[in-house]
Image (cartoon, rainbow, N blue to C red):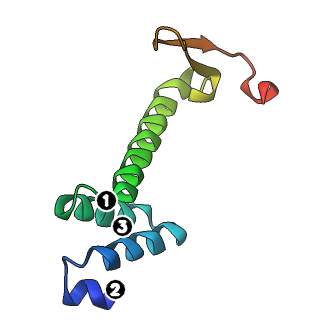
Amino acid sequence: CFLAVELDPNYIRALLRRAELYEKTEKLDEALEDYKAILEKDPSVHQAREACMVSLFGKLKELGNLVLRPFGLSTENFQIKQDSSSGSYSINFVQNPNNNR
């Protein structure tokens, strides 16, 4: 698939396969770049959209942990629950998050 993308940068299936290979080999930045390229060429590719969202949430979680770490906390100390009747969310603090799993 690497050669296929070189020969035809618009070959979506090859880009998707290469992104999956990057993910499996933990080259996440390269995978994200391929997923972004796929979305630019064809925004309807669900797998690429989902991978970009997962990456975004992962980066947000890293940022949250960076801010919380000096206080001895992490994002694991907070539970988010959605109210089924209103659709709104509530955030609860959990002192020992590992004990609640």
What separation in Å lies between label 1 and label 3 (alpha carbons)?
18 Å
Kind of element beneath mark 1: loop
Q: Position of residue 47 (x, y in %)?
A: 40, 58
Please state which amino acid type lies under the numbered disc 2: Phe
What separation in Å lies between label 2 and label 3 (alpha carbons)?
12 Å
Name the residue tied to disc 2. 2
Please state which amino acid type lies under the numbered disc 1: Val
Name the residue tied to disc 1. 45
Q: Is residue 76 above or below residue 32?
A: above
Q: Position of residue 67 (x, y in %)?
A: 46, 26
Q: Quadrant of residue 33?
A: bottom left
Specify which label sits upstream in the sequence, 1 or 3.
3
Q: Is 73 positioned to the left or the right of 5 in the image?
A: right
What separation in Å lies between label 2 and label 1 (alpha carbons)?
19 Å
Query: Do residues under tags 2 and 3 come within 8 Å of each other at their CB atoms?
Result: no
- Please identify the quadrant where the N terminus is shown: bottom left
Please state which amino acid type lies under the numbered disc 3: Glu
**Few, some or many residues within 10 Å of mark 2 (<14, 14–19, 20+):** few
Specify which label sits upstream in the sequence, 2 or 3.
2
Q: Is 69 positioned to the left or the right of 35 in the image?
A: right
Kind of element beneath mark 2: helix
Name the residue tied to disc 3. 30
Q: Position of residue 26 (x, y in %)?
A: 51, 66
Q: Is 34 in front, or is 46? A: 46
Q: Is 101 in front, or is 47? A: 47
Which mark is drawn over residue 84?
none
Which of label 2 and label 1 is nearer to you? 1
Q: Quadrant of residue 27?
A: bottom left
